[in-house]
Image: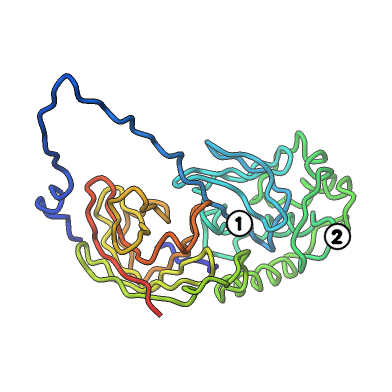
C-alpha cells in the first residue's frame, strides 16, 4: 500500500457513440426470454491506519461493523464512510483502500492541529500502549465515549477527553504528546509509501508483473505494477478527467465489455490527474487469476481510454 497523491480534451462524438447504440431484431410470439441475473455489487476491503486501528465503529450506506485486527472495513465503490468511537463521530469521507487521519480531515498537513489531536486520541486509547503491534480500541472506550461530543480542532481538546482517557482502563491515563503522536504517524506514512503495510501475501506468479498504458483517448498514460496478491499500484498517471463514469477496469485479455470484467477503483472522472498515484485493491472475491490487463474504462459508453497488459 501507499499514501496516495490525490490531485482537456473532450471525448469526440464518434467515441461517445461507440458502444452507445443498439441494434434491433424481429421476434415472434413463440420466442422465450432468458432472465437477466444481476450480480451483487462488488465489495472492497479497506484499512484504517495510524497503526492498523482495530475496534473503530464504521458505517456506510451498505455496510457497518468494527474494524478488525488489521484495521479492515468493508465498503462498496464511491460510498462515504463514517468512523466513530462511542458518540465521537469522525467526519465522513469517501471510502478507499487506505484511509488515515489525513484523509478523514481532508488535509495533507501532518501538523494540522485537528490531525495531531486525532492521532493523540487514537494512540492514547490503544489498550496495551504498544502501537507497534497496532492500535486496539476496546469496548470500554466506546462505553466511556457515550454522550461525548468533541471537536478535534478545539484549543481545549485535552480537557474534552480527560474523563474518556481516565475511564478507558487502558495503558495511558492521559493524552500522548503531539511530538510522540506525529513521530509514530510519520513512521506509518513512510511504511505506506514503501509498501510496508499490507495484509496480502506475495504468492501469485504474476506479482511483480507491470505494464504501461497505451494512450487511446483523454491523454491517458502511466504505469501499473502488481504489488502483491491483492494490490496493484498505478504511478506516473495522467488523465484529463473529462469522461463520464470512468474507472480502472480489470479483465482477461482486454475484454472489458464482458461480464467477467470488473471495476477496481472509485470513479476517477472530474479533476485532471498529473503524475498521480493510486493503490488499487482487488474487490472481495476476486484474485489475480481474474485479470491480466487493466483499462481506464468509461462504463456508460463501453469506451476504452487507455489499456495495458501485465507482463514480467
**Residue sitting at 25 percent across and 71 percent down?**
214
**Residue sitting at 46 percent across and 61 percent down?**
280
Q: Which residue is mark 2?
A: 128
Q: Is residue 245 left or right of residue 231?
A: left
**SS category of the residue bearing label 1:** strand
View extreme (front): residue:
30
Q: Is residue 241 left or right of residue 83?
A: left
**Residue 47, label in figure:** 1
**Residue 1, label in figure:** none
Q: Nearer the viewer, residue 102 or 267?
A: 267
Q: Which x, y percent locates residue 203?
A: 57, 72
Work out how far the residue at label 2 is from the one at label 1, CA to CA, in angstroms.
21 Å
View extreme (top): residue:
29
Asked if the residue at tag 1 contacts the one at tag 2, i.e. Cβ–Cβ closer than 8 Å, the answer is: no
**SS category of the residue bearing label 2:** loop
> In which quadrant of the rendered view does residue 92 lie?
top right
Q: Nearer the viewer, residue 99 or 88?
A: 99
The first of marks 2 and 1 along the sequence is: 1
> In which quadrant of the rendered view does residue 60 lie?
top right
> Colour mode?
rainbow
Q: Quadrant of the C terminus?
A: bottom left
**Residue sitting at 14 percent across and 50 percent down?**
18
Q: Within 10 Å of the Cα at label 2, are there few (<14), some (14-19), or many (20+) other Cα atoms?
A: some
> In which quadrant of the rendered view does residue 251 lie?
bottom left
Q: Which x, y percent locates residue 263?
A: 39, 53
Q: Nearer the viewer, residue 141 or 113?
A: 141
Q: Quadrant of the N terminus?
A: bottom right
Q: Which x, y percent locates residue 150?
A: 70, 43
**Residue sitting at 30 percent across and 60 percent down?**
296
Amino acid at each position: 500500500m501507499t499514501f496516495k497523491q490525490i490531485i482537456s480534451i473532450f471525448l469526440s462524438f464518434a467515441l461517445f457513440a461507440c458502444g452507445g447504440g443498439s441494434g434491433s431484431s424481429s421476434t415472434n410470439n413463440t420466442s422465450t426470454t432468458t432472465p437477466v441475473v444481476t450480480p451483487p455489487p462488488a465489495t472492497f476491503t479497506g484499512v484504517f491506519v495510524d497503526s492498523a486501528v482495530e475496534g473503530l465503529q464504521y458505517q456506510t450506506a451498505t455496510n457497518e461493523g468494527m474494524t478488525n485486527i488489521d484495521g479492515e472495513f468493508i465498503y462498496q465503490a464511491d460510498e462515504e464512510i463514517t468512523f466513530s468511537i462511542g458518540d465521537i463521530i469522525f467526519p465522513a469521507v469517501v471510502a478507499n483502500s487506505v484511509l488515515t487521519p489525513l484523509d478523514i480531515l481532508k488535509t495533507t498537513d501532518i501538523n494540522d492541529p485537528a490531525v495531531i489531536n486525532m492521532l493523540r486520541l487514537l494512540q492514547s486509547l490503544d489498550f496495551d500502549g504498544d502501537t507497534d503491534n497496532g492500535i486496539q480500541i476496546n469496548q470500554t472506550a466506546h462505553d466511556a465515549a457515550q454522550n461525548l461530543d468533541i471537536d478535534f480542532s478545539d484549543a481545549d481538546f485535552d480537557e474534552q477527553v480527560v474523563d474518556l482517557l481516565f475511564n478507558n482502563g487502558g495503558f495511558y491515563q492521559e493524552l500522548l504528546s503531539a511530538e510522540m503522536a506525529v513521530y509514530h504517524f510519520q513512521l506509518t506514512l513512510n511504511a505506506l509509501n514503501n509498501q510496508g503495510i499490507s495484509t496480502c501475501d506475495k504468492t501469485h506468479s504474476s506479482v511483480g508483473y507491470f505494464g504501461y498504458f497505451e494512450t487511446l483517448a483523454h491523454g491517458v498514460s502511466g504505469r501499473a505494477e502488481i504489488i502483491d496478491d491483492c494490490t496493484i499500484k498505478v504511478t506516473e498517471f495522467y488523465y484529463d478527467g473529462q469522461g463520464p463514469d470512468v474507472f480502472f477496469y480489470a479483465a482477461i485479455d482486454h475484454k472489458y465489455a464482458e461480464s467477467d470484467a470488473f471495476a477496481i477503483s472509485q470513479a476517477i472522472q472530474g479533476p485532471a490527474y498529473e503524475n498521480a498515484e493510486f493503490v488499487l485493491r482487488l474487490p472481495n472475491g476476486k484474485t489475480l487469476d481474474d485479470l491480466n490487463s487493466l483499462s481506464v474504462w468509461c462504463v456508460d459508453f463501453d469506451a476504452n481510454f487507455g489499456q495495458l497488459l501485465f507482463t514480467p
